[in-house]
Image (spheres, coloured by chain):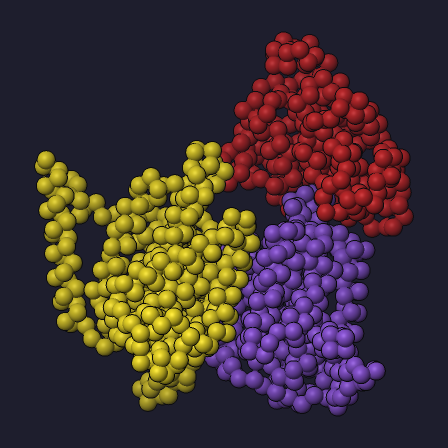
Amino acid sequence: MNYFMQQIINALGWGSILALLAAGYTMTFGIIGLVNFAYGEVFMAAAFAAYFALTIFNLPYWVALLVGLISAIVIGLAIERIAFKPVRGAGMITLFITSLGASIIIRNLFVMLFDDSLKSFKTPNFLRGVYLLSDLIFFKKNILIFSITIILCIVLVYIVKNTKLGIAMRSISYDSQIAETLGINTERIIIITFIIASFLGGMAGILWGILFGSVRASMGVIMVVDAFIASVVGGVGNVFGAMVSGYILAIGSALFIAYLPQELIGLKPLFVWVIFFIILIFKPSGLFRANIK
Amino acid sequence: MSNVPILELNNVVAGYGKKEIINKISIKINQGRIVTLLGSNAVGKTTILKTILSQTCLRSGEIKYNGIDISNLATHKIARLGISYVPEGRGIFANLTTKENLLAGAYLLKSKQELENNLNRVYSIFPILKERSNQLAESLSGGEQEMLVIGRSLMSKPNLLLLDEPSLGLAPKLVELIGKILKEINNEGVCILLVEQNAKLALELADYGYLIRKGTIVLEGDTKDLIKNKKIKEIYLGII
Amino acid sequence: MKFEKNTIVKYILGAGLFFVTFYLLEKLLSGFWLTLFLLFGINVILAISLNVINGWIGFFSIGHGGIMLVGAYAAAFLTLPPSFKVGILNLHLPAFILNIQLPLLPALLIGGIFGVMAGVVLVLPALRLRGMYFCAGTLGFNIIATTIAENLPNVTNGAMGLRQFPSYTNIWWVWGIAIFLIYITLMLKKSYIGRAFISIGKDQCLAEHMGINLLKYKIYAFGFSAFFTAIGAILWVHLILNLYPRAFDLILVFSVVTMIVIGGMGSVSGSIIGAAIVTLFTEILAPIEEGFNFFGFQVPQALGLTTILLGVLLIVVLIKKPEGIMGEKEISLNFLKGKK
């Protein structure tokens, strides 16, 4: 039993990061039908920016955090203006292909400039160590990451459910033409959505760096696929659903490999795809209410 | 009341992409009036409404609202001027609750008090909406959805209401109710442009009417004259 | 009678032209340029096959890496020398496979058939998923195929892959098959089957109402595409002389997708043009990535530069000319038909 619980607790760190990524992912997926493969590079670029601020410029941790978040927003908006806005009406697949292109450009740019090696940095002292609670180990890092994520989740769900902005976002997700006739400036709301999504992605990237004590240029590629699956599982455009699904996928993957024989551990990526196909066959609209037509 | 018509279309030619749907349409709505656009399916009536809202390609001609040229204005800015739209086929947000749909309609309101007042007003006009306020809009019946859409359009206290076939697929009793409500709203000063296939409802309600055919106006006049007109009787055989 | 004689003469002339041209090319080209020309041919095969699914039937697949992987491994098991399979790697395969070494033709055919089987597995989501979700499903298929291949060390030698391939690929195989494929695809496009494919791509419901059996034609299309995709992969593996699962990941699929998008998604000539552009880009620009000496000034390494430029090219095409260079049309060869 303890082994089981420990797997779950260990997975909460990575699960939180996936939850944040999934939430940001599903927001742009819902509002303009964008399957954003380049989102992983926003995630990665923020982590790199924070890493450079920390190691090369020796700035304090909170400044590095700010640098990372601002970089995420700048890059996220830049990608939107350059690669997405021009093809906005052209259908989901075209948007996906341009996002593939953007992802490849940015990732290879980083590989070209900084190579694909692991870049580590020192974990701050207050984040080192563990808490023990009756045989269960809680890493301080994981607790921090989990707490930040839960707070952001509460704020995000509040915005989506209880504010004008949230109603505008959900209306546009369903039918942007009718939303316009109600006086909603869809262009402005889409930009705000990208800002929020980039913020979440950047936050996730920085937390990833903290969790693993390192960053690398290819860190976005695997996560972005998991984030996509989490959005579909959670119901497209549903922020709460995406976050819950992120945790489900992370904990599920962890339990999956915990009970597999050693030599089959390489099959970990298959878990999320099995869930993907199961959901699309039995509950294609997702576990929670989707926000699209 | 001002003498400037609240809405004026002058020789408007418009369509989607390269296709032209409406040709040289000129319409005038005077302050406080109800005007109707009649015609059978696919003659361009919806296109006229969408052109007013800047959701089509305007080839030539101009559109004026209270004397101001709105031909090149973005849709959300047109809504800001006090024009509300009730789309064809309900046009609710199925992913939002009844109340959230109404709140979406109140997007442009600044004060919470105003929102409360307008919400209560809509609830008093359509009590069923208050009952279903926390239900998902897609679970409402066809008639309830139409009431929701009309209610949503009233939330912003519009000066001009554009309605696209509100009676489509509704039971006669409900059609009667909607007619009554539109009359009431008009008495309070809201101008209405009503697109309808149901000629009886339209001609009873409106002051002035235009008959559209293949994208152009073939007939216009005061509704009391139109009712007696042979052409209308020809087209709407048996309905009047 | 006269017409028949003209056609036969045409074919004989065509075949003669083909043999002479490629004989000369084989003699003249060597080393880098030969490899470049062979890669171009292989890319043409891959691009045209993918275009049948993505361009004609309209199901946007990014899972063809999985089909290539299955076909390539199936052929590899047959063409690798027994000394390698048993002695060095000790693969857990049936004895009769471990002990034989086949020439290219049977390997192509058998590998192609395995590719078709993989294609059938790939088409399963097509029955239930549409549009973007189908696309995502094919991505999953690709990832699942490469992950499984990496995790069966006793069968595939895992991530380290296979080496010691016989160098079977030459200009005749590659371009013989490529020209054959170009020819039958162009014929297909004008035939009932091809037009059925294209009508499914334009409007599935309408096609169904016109009496086209959707399932049958989708399976035909996937089978055809998978067969030649596998063949392309087998030819490639026997050119570069190694095979490992990661080679078939998204980067490879992305480059083939780029070829058909740039060239024009419904067009055979477009696929050829797209394949040419992408092959030139990757192979000719590749040396620049290593860093070079430019009039005494050392330009530093720039790994990944070609991929970046390809990505930029793709986005520019999608924004400026989304239907690609050729759109859905073909280069008109009317002058060859002797039309006046």
C234 lies above or below B52:
below
- The chain shown in red is which? B
- Quarter of the picture containing the N terminus of chain A is bottom right
Q: Note whether residue A77 is visible.
A: no
Classify residue A261 as left or right of residue B76: left
Q: Position of residue B153 (x, y in %)?
A: 76, 38
In this rendering, the count of numbered labels is 0
* Display colour for chain A: purple
Q: Nearer the viewer, residue C135 or B75?
A: C135
Q: Position of residue C305 (x, y in %)?
A: 42, 75
Left or right for C68, reference C170: right
Residue B227 sits above or below residue B138 on the image: above
Q: Is residue A163 left or right of residue C300?
A: right
Determine the residue positioned at 84% across, 43% down: B133
Quarter location, residue A275: bottom right
Chain letter for the yellow colouring in the rendering: C
Residue drawn at the location 76% of the way across and 63% of the way down: A156
> Does residue C234 show up?
yes
Residue drawn where x is 62% and y is 56% of the image? A278
